[in-house]
Amino acid sequence: MKKFFKRIKFVFTFWRFIPFLIDYLFAKELSIWKKVLPLAISIVYIVIPIDLIPDFLFFFGYTDDILFTTFLLQTMVKYAPDRLKEKYELLMK
């Protein structure tokens, strides 16, 4: 349950992660797969109409999209080089 609330908080503070994402995509320490794969998976999941919860259930339908995408973004933070974590104070504990 704690992780759920952490992801909800992440959604509301997502705008702060945009500079991190740009630096993440240009980081030379990471393989191309660690850069592109999470973004591609999240875009495909949002675009494809097959979801865990159908989008016509408005609030609940979009909630699973948001939670899935934030999970992938948190995975990107975990794989980020230490210099980026320190620069953006995102050290995972």
Image (spheres, rainbow, N blue to C red):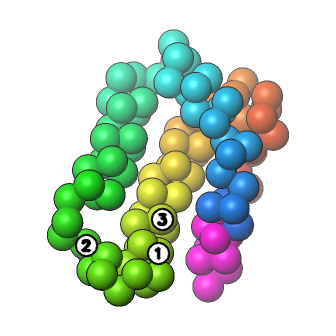
Label 3 element class: helix
Which image quarter holds the C terminus?
Answer: bottom right
- Give the secondary structure at mark 1: helix
User: Is residue 90 in view?
Assistant: yes
When the figure is inspected, residue 44 is found, relative to residue 1, above or below; the finding is above
Q: Going by the image, does 20 lie left or right of 91?
A: left
Q: Measure the C-alpha gap from mark 3 to mark 1.
A: 5 Å
Between residue 10 and residue 63, name the one nearer to us: 63
* Picture residue at 63% right of the left edge, 36% below the top: 18
Q: Which numbered disc covers residue 51? A: 2
Q: Which residue is mark 1?
A: 63
Q: Report if residue 5 lies within the magenta region.
A: yes
* Disc 3: which residue: 66
Which residue is farthest top? 28
Amino acid type shown at disc 3: Ile
What's under tag 2, amino acid-wise? Answer: Asp
Q: Which mark is residue 47?
A: none
